[in-house]
Image (cartoon, rainbow, N blue to C red):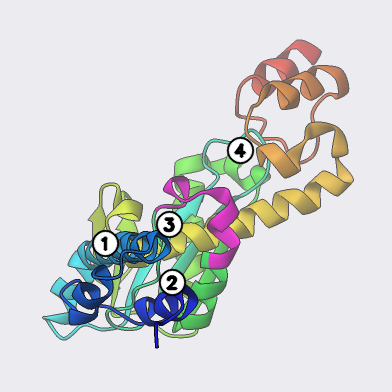
């Protein structure tokens, strides 16, 4: 009895090997629907293989530490150094050994529509997550670089598990825990990428909450960055308690008012 195309699609979905003999068998079926299904499944397997290879590469730094007997590795990243308003937010994430999360990457490389799903997956799989936050007033007081370091130390302190090693995106922290500074670490380390997503989603949620209090500034869309609509609102309505007074054009606006 000839199998239906639906049945063949279901069987193809179970194949995980390009060399599986079933492919050769189904290729003898000349129905266009079967041929299309074979092509689609091969393409899917190719994409899955490429993604697995990418995620394996993103474990390079973690695996070097695993080889030394280090397993509790925290990745740390920040979001919000550039905006005109709101806090800088950091996250520290400890993932299980050799953890792979499909689609995980630097938050700037991940479509915004996928942030929440990956955020949820990280929360499900992570051994520990810590959040750090430094508000705009503290940023003005000590500068954004120092504020970011402070927020990162907060994130580490807020982990429920003490890490044996910390991987940091392009920063060096004053602490006793061994650390590795990685340039573009959020795109090169799974642990840092996970921290990037956690920090990004957390900060975006905060800015959406702030937008309810200050709807004119479009914080739910611009997250405090200096978009045209945000700058126009600054001109029309002035600064809010969330704005960073050490940042331009806010700094000049305050000087003009003196």
For residue 140, which numbered disc appears in the image? 4
Residue visible at 38% across and 66% down in the picture: 34
Q: Earlier in the sequence, mark 4 or mark 2?
A: 2
Q: CA distance from mark 4 to mark 2?
A: 27 Å
Q: CA distance from mark 3 to mark 4?
A: 21 Å
Q: Earlier in the sequence, mark 3 or mark 4?
A: 3
Q: Is residue 158 visible?
A: no
Q: Earlier in the sequence, mark 3 or mark 2?
A: 3
Report whether 60 appears left or right of 37.
Answer: left
Q: Nearer the viewer, mark 3 or mark 1?
A: 1
For residue 108, which numbered disc appears in the image? none
For residue 77, which numbered disc appears in the image? 3
For residue 93, which numbered disc appears in the image? 2
Give the position of the C terminus as an image quadrant. Answer: top right
Callout 3: SS: strand
| Whole-percent x, y for residue 223 in the image | 66, 42
Q: CA distance from mark 3 to mark 1?
A: 31 Å
Which SS type dominates the magenta stretch? helix
Callout 4: SS: helix
Report whether 78 appears left or right of 43.
Answer: right
Residue visible at 60% across and 58% down in the picture: 201
Answer yes or no: do the residues labelled 3 and 1 have beta carbons within 8 Å? Answer: no
Q: Earlier in the sequence, mark 4 or mark 1?
A: 1
Q: Nearer the viewer, mark 4 or mark 2?
A: 2
Say whether residue 114 is magenta.
yes
């Amino acid at each position: 009895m000839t199998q239906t195309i639906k049945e063949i699609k279901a069987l193809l979905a179970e194949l995980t090997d390009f060399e599986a003999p079933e492919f050769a068998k189904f290729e003898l079926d000349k129905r266009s629907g079967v041929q299309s299904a074979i092509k689609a499944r091969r393409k899917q397997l190719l994409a899955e293989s490429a993604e697995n290879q990418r995620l394996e590469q993103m474990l390079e730094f973690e695996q070097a530490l695993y080889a030394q007997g280090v397993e509790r590795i925290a990745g740390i990243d920040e979001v919000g150094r550039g905006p005109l308003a709101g806090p800088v937010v950091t996250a520290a994430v400890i993932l299980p050994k050799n953890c792979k999360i499909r689609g995980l990457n630097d938050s700037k490389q991940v479509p915004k529509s996928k942030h929440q799903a990956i955020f949820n997956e990280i929360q499900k799989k992570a051994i520990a997550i810590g959040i750090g936050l430094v508000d705009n007033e503290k940023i003005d007081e000590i500068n954004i670089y120092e504020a970011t370091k402070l927020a990162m130390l907060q994130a580490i302190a807020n982990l429920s598990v003490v890490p044996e090693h910390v991987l940091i995106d392009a920063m060096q922290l004053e602490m006793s825990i061994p650390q590795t500074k990685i340039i573009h670490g959020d795109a090169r380390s799974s642990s840092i990428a996970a921290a990037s997503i956690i920090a990004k989603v957390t900060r975006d949620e905060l800015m959406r909450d702030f937008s309810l209090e200050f709807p004119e500034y479009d914080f739910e869309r611009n997250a405090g960055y200096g978009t045209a609509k945000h700058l126009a609102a600054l001109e029309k309505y002035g600064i809010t308690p969330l704005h960073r007074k050490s940042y331009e054009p806010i700094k000049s606006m305050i000087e003009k008012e003196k």
